[in-house]
Amino acid sequence: MIDYKPGKQAWYEENQPREGKAVDEIWIGDVAGSDVPRCGLTEMIGDIRRRIEGWDTCVVVDSKGVVLGLLRKKELDGDPKATAEQMMRPGPKTFRPNVTLQELLKSMREHEIQTNSLVTTAEGRLLGAISRADAEATLAHEQAAETRTDS
Amino acid sequence: MSAQVFSVADVKQLLDQGAQLVDVLGEDEFEHDHLPGAINIPLKQLDATTAARLDRNRPVLVYCNDFG
């Protein structure tokens, strides 16, 4: 007999599938967009800005994809010759993929987060991001569907 | 019990090799969520009778909630 000591939480924190009633819940790992732009510490702001045109967020990661910091519009509009490391907001708040969308939204509302929330594994590896607007819209859509099913 | 700490990749590899996955949490928790393909034998009910469901010729991988 083998004891999988990390347990099911560690499994879910790696964004692995589940069975049971929780399949009907929306976990943020299910809906986070993995296309959020990423950059390295030494990349210059001007180069990043050109590369991610249309985005107002870029996640600074290491070679393993572990989140180091975040560049939002203010930083991306800054000195084009500065590096990501010089400009980034270090250690941004992140969420695990097995947090429900409702829990995420509660936290975003309480902390008045209007932009993207980052979804990472327990080790900090970036899985994706979800915007407040997308989170609100997805939950509203889901609740409307539930109301139709109930009536 | 093995002292090795298994990663998600290790678990997947063992399952691919035919290991059986046993969730030892309570029934309600199991019904809410569990790893794909797991069967439920709550720890308090784990004995020779309940373990008879398992194939003795295949590895058995047990899990609970987390390290705690």
Image: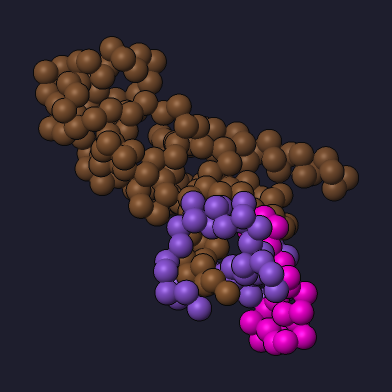
Chain colours: A brown, B purple
**Residue shown at the point (17%, 21%) measured from the top left:** A44
Residue placed most toward the observer, A102 or A14: A14
As drawn, A21 above or below A113: below
Q: Quadrant of the C terminus of chain B?
A: bottom left
x and y percentages locating residue A2 in the rendered image:
54, 71
In the image, is residue B48 part of the stretch drawn in magenta?
A: yes
Q: Dominant secondary structure of the magenta stretch?
A: loop
Q: Which residues are magenta?
A: B33-55
Total number of numbered discs in the rendering: 0
> Can residue B66 be seen from the camera position used here?
no
Is B37 placed above or below A45 here? below
- In the rendered view, would you say B27 is above or below A64? below
Q: Nearer the viewer, residue A137 or A22?
A: A22
Horizontal side, residue A1 vs residue B28: left or right: left
Q: Quadrant of residue A126?
A: top left
- Residue B49 visible in rendering: yes
Q: Residue at x 62, y 69 (%)?
A: B60
Q: Residue furthest right?
A: A151
Coordinates of residue B2 in the picture (x, y in percent): 47, 74
Which x, y percent locates residue B20? 66, 64
Of the pair A125 and B46, the residue shown nearer to us: B46
Q: Residue at x 62, y 51 (%)?
A: B16
Q: Where is residue A15? Give x, y as percent.
A: 52, 47
Q: Residue at x 28, y 12 (%)?
A: A50
Up/down of A50 relative to B60, above or below: above
Magenta span has B37? yes
Which of A8 and A30 lies nearest the eye of the viewer? A8
Q: Residue furthest front?
A: B57
